[in-house]
Image (spheres, rainbow, N blue to C red):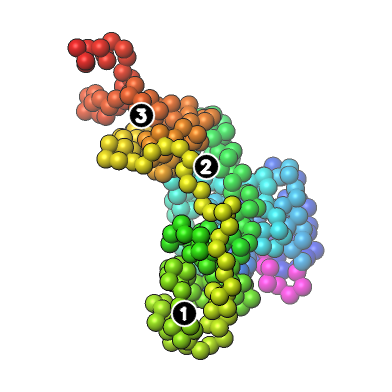
Amino acid sequence: MKIHDLITDTETLADLCQRLAKSDFVAVDTEFMRENTYYPLLCLVQIGNEEEAAAIDPLADGIDLKSLWDLLTDNEDVLKVFHAGGQDVEIVYNFTGKTPHPIFDTQIAMMAISQNEQIGYANLVESWLGLTIDKGARFTDWSRRPLTDRQIEYAIGDVTHLAKIFPKMLKKLIKTDRGRWLNAEMDKLADAENYRNDPGEVWRRIRAPSRNATVLGRLKALAAWREREAQDKDIPRGRIMRDETLADIASHPPKKQADLAKVRGLSNAWRENDIGRRMMKVLSNAEPLPGDEMPEKRSSGRPLGKEGKLVGDLLKLLLKIRSREIDVASRLLTRSDEMEALASGERDLPILEGWRYEVFGKDALELVEGRMAFAVEKGRLKMTRINGEAEEAATA
């Protein structure tokens, strides 16, 4: 594989992207800093296929990244391969308003062919290529220039290894016929809505203190205000105020600005500074949350009592057994809240649709409805279906 020197000019980058545009896939990774900023500071982009790879310096004077963004977001003929690519996709979205597509994430794919739910990149490389990665350069300051040879070598290694792993992983997915299991997960990763930071919707990510419309109205207004403050100052939202503090103020709003000094998580300066005045104005203008924006309650099912919780525990045990039997990460099959919903009587669930129903949902439903039980065979726990004769004998 040919490894290029660090690309720092527009023409060289455009030539590289023109060649890579003829590939079936490209492996992509980024290095960025976001500890002190609202928006991630992109410091390096690594990209490559099975024949060549390069690192691109987005901080180089005068470099235009348009050819790179066009390749990643507009070329539907080239598959973009990432590992744990959520933050990488977010960066592309921040620059372009679009996400890479089509997309493949090796961390997600590993869930379909192993019981690893969040395998790290170093472990991925070791398991597929038998190589140990030098992690020494991982936490360096990627914004400092010039970059060292060690930093560049480490960074490019992320895509050269990925370019070797992906074809092997693809063969296994095809052999096991599990590629279709990943379609929805990859589409979710590439969904631009996941990266569109609408200040008016940020409140939904915060644990709501109650279902009171007045409290939720204040929570929405405060969360939107904090988001805009953080964006304007380009600092992490937590530097303005932590979620817990924001939720507490929404539940117990201070009557006057001087009372902000009594709020846990705020300094005494809030009692008289400008940001405190702006927040108090937001609080005074906050309106109750409209009915059509209220968080939905479950439309069906029953609250889990003691018996229901036991059924939920049995479903978790079934999930553990099935995941082990077919060598798949349990997280790919279902989540705890979905199993609780199934135990409570809900039936309009992803677990009861498509491939998930075939490999797990059908058995889970039969367990809930009393047509399946646990058994021990040769010291191993397994599932067994209850037929009519067994039921009659048990009740005789």
Position of 152 with respect to 64 (left or right) is left
Q: Which quadrant holds residue 116?
A: top left
Position of 338 with respect to 188 (left or right) is left
Q: Amino acid at mark 1?
A: Lys
Residue 255 got which mark? Answer: 1
Q: Is residue 67 above or below residue 359?
A: below
Most extreme residue toward the left is: 396
Q: Amino acid at mark 3?
A: Val
Which residue appears at 39% of the width and 30% of the height? 364
Q: Is residue 10 above or below residue 295?
A: below
Q: Amino acid at mark 2?
A: Ala
Camera-nearest residue between 326 and 23: 326
Mark 3 highlights which residue? Answer: 368
Where does the image place residue 144, in percent across and percent down from the top left? 59, 76
Q: Nearer the viewer, mark 2 or mark 3?
A: 3
Where does the image place residue 141, in percent across and percent down from the top left? 54, 73
Q: Secondary structure at mark 2?
A: helix
Camera-nearest residue between 284 and 179: 284
Residue 114 in view (yes/no): no
Position of 21 with respect to 252 (left or right) is right
Where does the image place residue 380, in percent across and percent down from the top left? 25, 29
Within 10 Å of the Cα at label 2, are there few (<14), some (14-19), or many (20+) other Cα atoms? Answer: many
Mark 2 highlights which residue? Answer: 109
Instruction: Report, in whole angstroms, how far the alpha carbon at label 2 lies from the one at label 3.
Output: 30 Å
- Residue 172 lies in magenta, yes or no? no
Q: Which residues are magenta?
A: 52-63
Which residue appears at 70% of the width and 63% of the height? 95
